[in-house]
Image (cartoon, grey):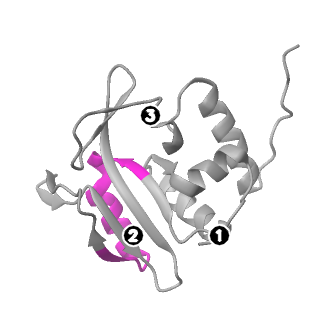
Amino acid sequence: MNLHQVVKVYRLLQEAGIETWLQGGWGIEALLGRQTRDHKDLDLLIEVDHVARLLRLLDSHGFVFKYTWEENRWVVEDGERVPTAFVVGHDDGCELDFHAGRFGGDDVVLPSWSSERALSLAEAWVCSMEYQSAATRWRRNFACMLGTICPPIRRRM
């Protein structure tokens, strides 16, 4: 996947009101503010309450459901049975790898996929979870990757 595809998908989801957190390689690239290597896919974390709407949106944009991961759990959302760990693809080569969870109190992500326990935000840091200074850095760096104007970084002495 290339940066143009990442930006296109990210903007599509944001415009649809589907809050998204980058995970994996592109999540790290966003934290760094630049692309350092090629990527096969885009790993995304979303809230489980948005999966049915997400799948309809992606279908309307030419994405097809490819498969679920071994850790997938099926849940019922708005009367619809939906996956929580799955991959969709597009014939332009864009591949999206989704995991869906619930965001609980005490700064934890409650995975809806098969997991032994909740993840602390410290463990989910590479998922680009929005918290404190990491969130500010992530948003600033990803905005730079999107080509928007970024304010100068003020360093404390």
Instruction: Check the image and report above or below for 110 versus 48.
Output: above
**Mark 1 sits on what residue?**
38
**Cβ–Cβ below 8 Å for labels 3 and 1?**
no
Q: Residues within 10 Å of mark 3 (few under 14, many from 20)?
A: few
Residue span colored magenta:
45-66
The reply to whether discs 1 and 2 touch (Cβ–Cβ < 8 Å) is: no
Task: Name the spot of residue 87 as percent of width and height, x first.
Answer: 35, 68
- What number of labels is visible? 3
- Name the amino acid type tagged 3: Glu
Residue at the spot of label 2 = 58
Q: Quadrant of residue 155?
A: top right
Q: Earlier in the sequence, mark 1 or mark 2?
A: 1
Spatial separation of the CA atoms under disc 3 and disc 2 = 29 Å
Quarter of the picture containing the N terminus is bottom right
Mark 1 element type? loop
Q: Nearer the viewer, residue 73 or 49?
A: 73
Distance CA(mark 3)–CA(mark 1) = 24 Å
Q: Residue at x 38, y 58 (%)?
A: 98
Q: Amino acid at mark 1?
A: Asp
Horizontal side of 67 relative to 130 (left or right) equals left
Task: Check disc 3 and report the residue beneath it.
Answer: 123
| Placement of the C terminus among the 4 image quadrants | top right
Position of residue 41 measured from the top left corner of the image (x, y, whole percent): 51, 68
Of all residues, the one furthest to the bottom in this rendering is 91
Q: Earlier in the sequence, mark 3 or mark 1?
A: 1
Seen at 77% across and 50% down, the residue is 148
Secondary structure of residue under mark 2 = helix
Disc 1 from disc 2: Cα separation: 23 Å
In the rendered structure, does residue 46 fall within the stretch colored magenta?
Answer: yes
- On screen, residue 106 above or below 98: above
- Disc 2 marks which amino acid? Leu
